[in-house]
Amino acid sequence: MLTSMILGILTIVLALAFSLLHLAAAFSAMKQKNYSLGNTCILVGSCITSLALAIFYFVPLATILLWIVGSSIVCYGAYWNGQQQENQHISHHIIRITSAIVITVLFILL
């Protein structure tokens, strides 16, 4: 029982950090008048992941599906930004994708 509660809290904290950090990054880019496709994808994806967290306790299956879609859009948007600026940081993409996969697996385990 305690393990499942700790796993749930860990999942929510990691997912909230992932979602809010990307939301802040997208708003920061939009504030600087950078309305590229990559930044728009990051904004839309982080809004979808935030929605997934909002409905977590009500519809768990929809949460998992929305999380997968939202985090995929965020990862694509970040990749697109790197391609447009011709400044790819592969390590950043690996960390982002790995954290999205870990959070997805944690959602599935709950």
Image (spheres, rainbow, N blue to C red):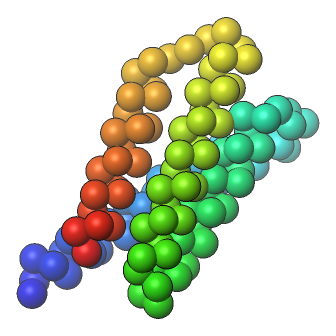
Quadrant including the C terminus = bottom left
Residue positioned 22% across, 68% down in the render:
109
Nearer the observer, 25 or 76: 76
Reply above or below: 105 against 86: below
In the foreground, 85 or 48: 48
**Residue at the image position 37 percent from the left and 66 percent from the top:** 13
Quadrant assignment for the N terminus: bottom left
Q: Position of residue 38 (x, y in %)?
A: 72, 34
Q: How many numbered dots are placed on residues in this image?
A: 0
Q: Is 95 left or right of 33, judged from the image as shown?
A: left
Q: Quadrant of residue 30?
A: top right
Q: Is residue 1 above or below residue 29?
A: below
Please give the name of the residue rendered at 59% of the width and 44% of the height, measured from the top-left corner: 74
Task: Tell me if residue 19 can be seen.
Answer: no
How far across and how far down the image is residue 27, in percent? 75, 49
Q: Residue at 71% across / 15% down in the picture?
A: 85
Q: Position of residue 72 (x, y in %)?
A: 53, 46
Q: Is residue 68 visible?
A: yes
In the image, 38: left or right of 96?
Answer: right
- Relative to 107, 73 lies left or right: right
| Name of the residue lying farthest toward the right | 33
Looking at the rendering, which quadrant does residue 9 occupy?
Answer: bottom left
Residue sitting farthest toward the top:
86
Could you tell me residue 51's position as x and y percent?
60, 72
